[in-house]
Image: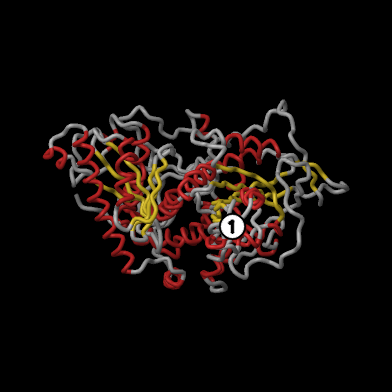
Amino acid sequence: MAILQPEQRVRSKVYLGVTPPISIAESTAREKEVTVTLMEELRRQNTFESEEEARTREIVLGRVAALVKKFVAKVSLIRGLSEAAATAAGGKIFTFGSYRLGVHGPGSDIDTLCVVPKHVLREDFFEFFEPMLKDLQGVTECSGVPEAYVPIIKTKIDGIPLDFLMARLNLSSIPDDLSLQDDSLLQGLDERCVRSLGGSRQIGEILRLVPNVDVFRDALRCIKLWAQRRAIYSNVNGFLGGVAWALLVARICQLYPNAIAGAIVSRFFIIMHQWAWPQPVLLKQIEDGPLQVRVWNPRLYPTDRAHRMPIITPAYPSMCSTHNVTESTQSVMTEEFKRGADIVDKVIVGTAEWSELFAKHDFFLRYRYYLQITASTGDPELQIKWAGTVESRVRQLVMKLEPVDSLIRAHPFIKGFDQVSYCLSETEVKAVVQGDISDAVASRKPEDIEGKEGARTIYTTSFYIGLAIKPKPAGVTGPRKLDISYPTTDFTKMVKMWDKYNEGTMGIYVRHIRSSGLPDNVFDPGERPGKVTAKRAKSSNQPDLPNKRQRSSQTLAELKATTESGTARRASISESLNSKPLPKPTQMPPPSEATPALATAVVKS
């Protein structure tokens, strides 16, 4: 069957997406000019990997593909298969994520799915494949997380980071020409295998549903860099992950099938800033399939109605890729869409450069008070697992903080900060595990503690939440009281409920700190403002937590800045987006009033 080009699709009323395009017009000369400058800026920003790194990735994937076959053969022999049958059992890898999308950059990880036959169990993946990976030449890191929502092994081979998932199909062998797009392959699989297969299947559908893959990739590379620089690229922390950003860009490409990358980026910000959430973003109509599994349906499931920014995956079974978004993270992203729209408007009319779009975030300069969550152990491999467990639950702390009176926003940062501390005494150890690392400890080297009695090496990972406080009401004088002891104490208890938690080897500590008390490792060289001598920060469960209103680095004039042409274009696009939104999501109820207040904080304005 002949493949229709985008123009032919529109003329024959065969278009991609759930609605007709907004415009099938070609991009203007100016949009073509800014696309050239955009690609030049993306190269200056080092978003493309070198040819040498690309070759290394291909070699590593070839070695991994061979290792997966060896792993399957080994397990097959253990299960009693003959040598011939064990060899024929196969095993295959599929990439997904940014590598499969074609928008990976230098140092990006490769999301890799290992597909195995039915006699290979998930336990075998961690019992046999993980040790085989550790023994592979060139491996410098390797850590399995079998209890994760999607069980995973993280490793680094010849400097290339890889994340491995496993899916066992209901087949006796895995042929080399296997395709995962056949829905019938999902029959008879457990939920974890269906989730593991989802990444590769979703990327395949996204690439099939965009009118021009090259334009899509160029635009997505821009949006991905912008989201990373603005610190809103993190599914686990309540922002959007790679798949969600790809789905948004793909939808804009469907709405403007003949536009080039610069035009797609411009319309992306305009449309996303105006989007009538919780109206979902869909690349195609949601479909039924062969499984008795839940498909996203807000009319049927209350939890689906609660999704604040639903962006729905296209491959069966369709799910919400943004169920982690909270009230706070949505408000942060909305502000960033607005900022992006303003800047790109100026780029189009020639009064700004693309580099302004990619300016670094100001998270550690934006707020006066922060929560610091520190996970600690004495072992580097254990620290990776423990810190990952804590990070996966930080979003829960954000949701517990959001209903607190006087808090406008609990803004989580998208990653943790690792540090290795060489301590000479138990006093230093105690301070380090509480996130308080002195300059003396921070500058100490391993050889400084060699052979010294009582010396210990402590591994810490600290996560941060910025606290925006409501301004003091007019006429109110004196300090105010703010109680966040319940959310922080409840969070600590929840983290310690991890079935592998060991109080003797793992530490978790939550404390509030002023901006002046932030450690140096959260700032780039020269970024930190003049340091002010501050009192030592106190634990969040003590009664004197100070908080003040948000200090924004962006002026009201900057927020309102927009070009006349940009305003006109936004108005035009807005008329094309009128649609009836779904019911507003339900709000998370506040903590029970029966819960006793464990501490009351004083807020001094």
In this rendering, position of residue 358 left or right of residue 201: right
Taking the image as drawn, is residue 553 in sight? Answer: yes
Return the x and y of residue 266 as percentages of the image width and height: 49, 62
Q: Nearer the viewer, residue 62 or 155?
A: 155
- The amino acid type of the residue labelled 1 equals Lys
Residue occupying image coordinates x 87% and y 47%: 478
Return the x and y of residue 249 as percentages of the image width and height: 43, 54
Residue 555, image quadrant: bottom right
Residue occupying image coordinates x 79% and y 47%: 603
User: In this picture, is 506 found above or below 292?
Assistant: below
Mark 1 lies on a secondary structure that is helix
Q: Nearer the viewer, residue 450 or 173?
A: 450
Residue under label 1, please give it: 338
Return the x and y of residue 183 as percentages of the image width and height: 28, 37
Taking the image as drawn, is residue 14 in sight? Answer: no
Residue 74, image quadrant: top left
CA neighbours of label 1 inside 10 A, class few (<14), some (14 to 19), many (20+): some
Q: Which of 369 and 297 is in front in this view?
A: 369
Residue occupying image coordinates x 68% and y 62%: 553
Colouring of the image:
secondary structure
User: In this picture, is 496 found above or below 63?
Assistant: above
User: In this picture, is 297 found above or below 181?
Assistant: above
Return the x and y of residue 277 as percentages of the image width and height: 55, 44
In this rendering, position of residue 542 left or right of residue 501: right
Q: How many discs appear?
A: 1
In this rendering, position of residue 120 left or right of residue 416: left
